[in-house]
Image: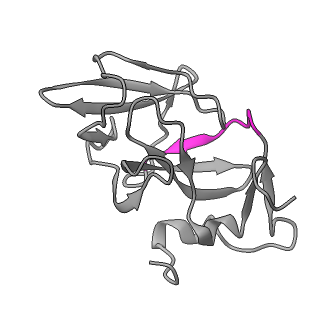
Amino acid sequence: MKNQQRARDEQYLRKHRYNERIQLKTGTFLHCYCPKCASNLIVDNMVKLVARTQGSSGILELSPYLNVFEHHSTINIQPDSELNDVTCPHCNQSIVHPEARCEACGSRTAEISIAAVHIRVPFLICMREGCHWHGISPDDEKLLIQDSSDEW
């Protein structure tokens, strides 16, 4: 997938001379969308998803602000446990990434689409309770610089 651009990303990743790179600072509000149906995932200023653990499912709410790791859940998620699945509340499709792993702990990741300014890119989040890793693909890093980046 490195050299392939997904069709759903095409409209958001066109290069313009004004937006070759964008810097994302901690606390930046990220507009969040389902990567499958493109529905808005923000409800009451939180990213709302459906989480499944062994034998139960419920609502998982995540902060939409970059590097703010506040979250709430209607189910009990044990410390250091990995969710079995994360789905979109609109289309009910799984958003678990088929290949990407957390670079901090090795757990599976879930993908949402984020938009900050005028660019929408896939954003990976770790599915393990308590792990704060998140990331974007190396190709998308060419478009965005996080404020924790070593590049500046």
Q: Residue at x 28, y 16 (%)?
A: 76
Q: Residue furthest left?
A: 55
Q: Please, is residue 11 above or below residue 52 in the view? A: below
User: In this image, 120 relative to 122: left or right?
Assistant: right
Numbered label tally = 0
Of 152 and 86, which appears nearest the observer? 152
Part of the protein shown in magenta: 26-34
Q: Residue 31 colored magenta?
A: yes
Q: Residue at x 55, y 22 (%)?
A: 70
Q: Position of residue 102 (x, y in %)?
A: 45, 51
User: In this image, 151 relative to 28: left or right?
Assistant: right
Which of the image's four quarters has the N terminus? bottom left
Q: Residue at x 57, y 28 (%)?
A: 69
Q: Quadrant of residue 30?
A: top right
Q: What secondary structure is the magenta-colored segment mainly?
A: loop
Q: Position of residue 78 (x, y in %)?
A: 30, 22
Q: Quadrant of residue 85?
A: top left
Q: Please, is residue 118 above or below residue 61 in the view? A: below
Q: Please, is residue 99 above or below residue 25 in the view? A: below
Which of the image's four quarters has the C terminus? bottom right
How is the protein colored in the picture?
A: one colour
Q: Position of residue 5 (x, y in %)?
A: 51, 77
Q: Position of residue 39 (x, y in %)?
A: 44, 44
Q: Please, is residue 26 above or below residue 95 in the view? A: above
Q: Residue 71 colored magenta?
A: no
User: In this image, 35 relative to 55: left or right?
Assistant: right
